Amino acid sequence: MAIEHAEQALTPSSYITDHLSFNTKPIGDGSFWVLNYDSFIMSVLLGVVVMGLIWRVARSATSGVPSKGQAFVELIFSFVDEQVKNIFHGDRHRFIAPTALTVFLWVLAMNAMDFLPVDVMHHFVYAPLGLEHWRSVPTSDINTTFALALAVWFLMIYFSIKVKGLGGWIHELFYAPFGGAKFFKPQSAMGYVGLLLSPLLFVANFAFNIIEYVSKPLSHSLRLFGNMYAGEVIFLLIGLWAATGLTGTIFGAILGAGWSIFHILIVALQAFIFMMLTVVYLAMAHESH
Amino acid sequence: MNINFTLIAQAIAFAVLIWFTVKFVWPPLLTAIETRQKEIADGLAAAQEGKSALEVAAKKSEVTLNEAKQKASEIIGQAEKRGSQIVEEAKGTAKTEGDRILAGAKAEIDQEVNRAKEGLRSQVSALAIAGAEKILRKEINANAHSEMLAKLAAEL
């Protein structure tokens, strides 16, 4: 895909660094107050376009014979709805199913930007617009995936507290998954040992829950980020090979095409996995132990 | 690759998108699909109902047809019976009438014969008297012998 006619001044490392750095805009003091406006603009643009298209169909949705566009949207709708129905056994239509649809379509669209040939885009689209080393794939930015995962994480805690109450949620932090101390009169010597050791269960439970709460958003976000970032890097490496000469160009093109085709699977699969994890996490928050 | 403000910006974008979908995208699609599902279910139920109604109607029509056939054959039987009855009656009437006419004719003939006999008798008696008058001329008194002649005429 990425056939690079490298300029002489360009070295492999500068080529890759150039393609993997963001357009940043500082909005305050400190390293945190910086906005990667290319991934932000791309993601918002994609979100508006994708959800806007769906909205346009949904607005004029008829219960009669659907148009082809509506049939396609309904296909996606039913697919997402079916997945949510299998995992979450509550009123899914109020929040979780629409959230799953949003996550799936948005992430899919952002992932799909990986199909844009990086260098062709740079030379013929972004450069004429005055945009240097523009990043097309928002999901290969850890900020995007982490933002999504963190949002889901907060929703998870919100639903936990909403369903079980604040007390119930805190109780669960200390009593699940191993259970808590039971204060009864022991029957044997081992029973006394158990009674003395039982407060340790609270520690174990709490540690376990903390690890779970930390690992959930990390695995959720890093899985998507890692896949998309790796995909992008491989395109860049193929692009580098394509820059070495005619043989490299030919094989680079073949390899690039192959990787793109394989990447269709990764793009769709990662979007699907991200959606499923979102639904699973939110469904788990609704269940009490 | 460092965490920065993009995180917050993207999270806000995500929240807005979720809100938008929850509010504007999901409900109309859900309504459309659920309404259609209901319509299809209703349609199928109606079709089933129609089918069973058709079966009932077919059975009913068969029963009615059979009844009609039976009634028709009954009517035909009755008509045939009545027809033969009428013929029999007509035959009887005709026979009686014929007999009556025949009897009348016979009586009239008898009457005629009697009348002719009567006429002839009186004429024969007159002839006999005339003959006897001619033969006896003088000795016979018509008045004296009329009783004997009338007796004679009655014997003829």
Image (spheres, grey):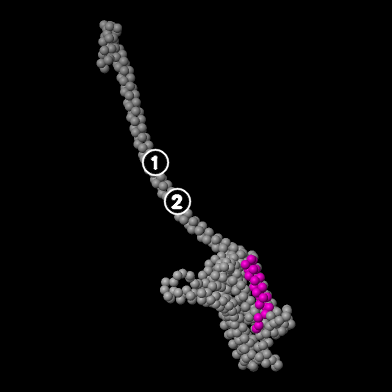
Upstream in sequence: badge 1 or badge 2: 2
Q: Residues within 10 Å of mark 2 (few under 14, many from 20)?
A: few
From the viewer's perspective, is B137 left or right of A127?
A: left
Residue span colored magenta:
B1-24
Circle 2 marks a residue in which chain? B
Instruction: Name the kind of residue labelled 1 in the image.
Output: Ala
Does A259 appear in magenta?
Answer: no
Q: Which residue is mark 1?
A: B79
Does A190 sit above or below residue B128? below
Identified at 40% across, 43% down, the residue is B75
- Asked whether A185 or B141 is in front, the reply is A185
Q: Do dots 1 and 2 share one subunit?
A: yes
- Asked whether B87 or A83 is in front, the reply is A83
Q: Secondary structure at mark 2?
A: helix
Instruction: Name the kind of residue labelled 2 in the image.
Output: Ser
Circle 1 marks a residue in which chain? B
Q: Secondary structure at mark 1?
A: helix
- Asked whether A36 or B150 is in front, the reply is A36
Q: Which residue is mark 2?
A: B61
Residue A238 found in image quarter:
bottom right
Identified at 59% across, 80% down, the residue is A222
Residue A65 found in image quarter:
bottom right
Identified at 51% across, 74% down, the residue is A199
> Which of the two discs, 1 and 2, sits closer to the camera?
2
Residue A269 visible, this angle: no
